[in-house]
Image (cartoon, helix red, strand yellow):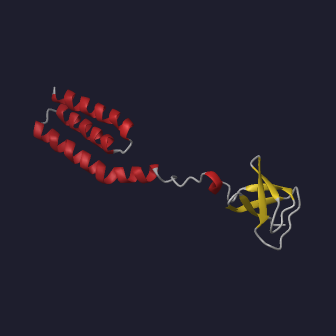
C-alpha cells in the first residue's frame, strides 16, 4: 500500500512538472518513485522517507542545474532587426555613404555603405553590418 502511494505521488509530481517547467517537481517525482521502489522491497516507512529525501535532494542539487544549463543554452535568439545583422542582402539602388536601397530577405530597406568611400552598384551582394534606425548599414567585399 505504501509503494502504491509513493508511485502515485511520483506520477502526479512528474505530471505536474509539465505545468511548471522548472525541473523541481520532476526531481521530487523521481525521488518518490525511488521511495516506491524501496517500499516494494518491504523497507520501513522511515527508510522510504530517507530514500525520497536523498534522491530528491541529490537530483535537485546535481542534475537540475545541469539540465537547466542545457535547456537554456540557446536562449540568446536574435529577433527583429538584430536578426538581420550579418545577413546577406542584394543592392537594388546604388548605395553610397548617404543613400541607397537593398533587398534583405524579400524586404526593401534604405541603406548606406559602412565604408564612407565605398560605392556599391545594383545587383551586388552585401553584408548587413548594422541597422541604424530604418537604414541598413552594408558592406561589400568587392
Viewed as shown, does residue 137 lie left or right of 2?
A: right
Q: Position of residue 2 (x, y in %)?
A: 16, 29
Q: Quadrant of the N terminus?
A: top left
Residue 67: percent from left, percent from top? 40, 49
Total marks placed: 0
Q: Nearer the viewer, residue 17 or 108?
A: 108
Who's the residue at 83% across and 74% down the image?
117
Is 86 above or below relative to 105?
Answer: below
Measuring from the top left, give residue 95's x and y in whole percent.
84, 63
Furthest residue in direction bottom, as rendered? 117
In the displayed structure, 39 sits above or below 127; it is: above
Who is closer to the viewer here, 125 or 32? 125
Q: Is residue 32 above or below residue 104?
A: above
| Figure check: 35 above or below 111 | above
Q: What residue is shown at x 21% (from left), y 37% (from top)?
A: 35
Q: Is residue 103 left or right of residue 76?
A: right
Q: Position of residue 138 (x, y in %)?
A: 76, 63
User: Which residue sits at x=14%, y=32%?
Assistant: 42
Q: Does residue 77 appear left or right of residue 5 in this picture? A: right
The residue depicted at 31 percent of the width and 45 percent of the height is 24
Image quadrant for the C terminus?
bottom right
Amino acid at each position: 500500500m505504501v509503494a502504491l502511494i509513493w508511485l502515485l505521488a511520483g506520477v502526479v509530481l512528474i505530471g505536474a512538472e509539465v505545468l511548471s517547467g522548472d525541473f523541481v517537481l520532476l526531481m521530487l517525482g523521481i525521488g518518490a518513485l525511488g521511495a516506491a521502489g524501496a517500499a516494494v522491497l518491504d523497507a520501513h516507512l522511515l527508510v522510504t522517507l530517507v530514500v525520497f529525501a536523498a534522491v530528491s535532494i541529490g537530483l535537485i542539487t546535481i542534475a537540475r542545474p545541469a539540465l537547466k544549463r542545457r535547456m537554456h543554452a540557446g536562449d540568446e535568439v536574435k529577433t527583429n532587426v538584430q536578426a538581420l545583422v550579418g545577413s546577406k542582402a542584394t543592392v537594388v539602388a546604388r548605395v553610397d555613404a548617404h543613400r541607397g536601397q537593398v533587398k534583405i530577405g524579400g524586404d526593401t530597406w534604405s541603406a548606406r555603405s559602412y565604408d564612407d568611400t565605398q560605392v556599391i552598384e545594383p545587383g551586388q551582394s552585401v553584408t548587413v553590418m548594422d541597422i541604424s534606425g530604418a537604414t541598413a548599414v552594408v558592406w561589400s567585399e568587392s
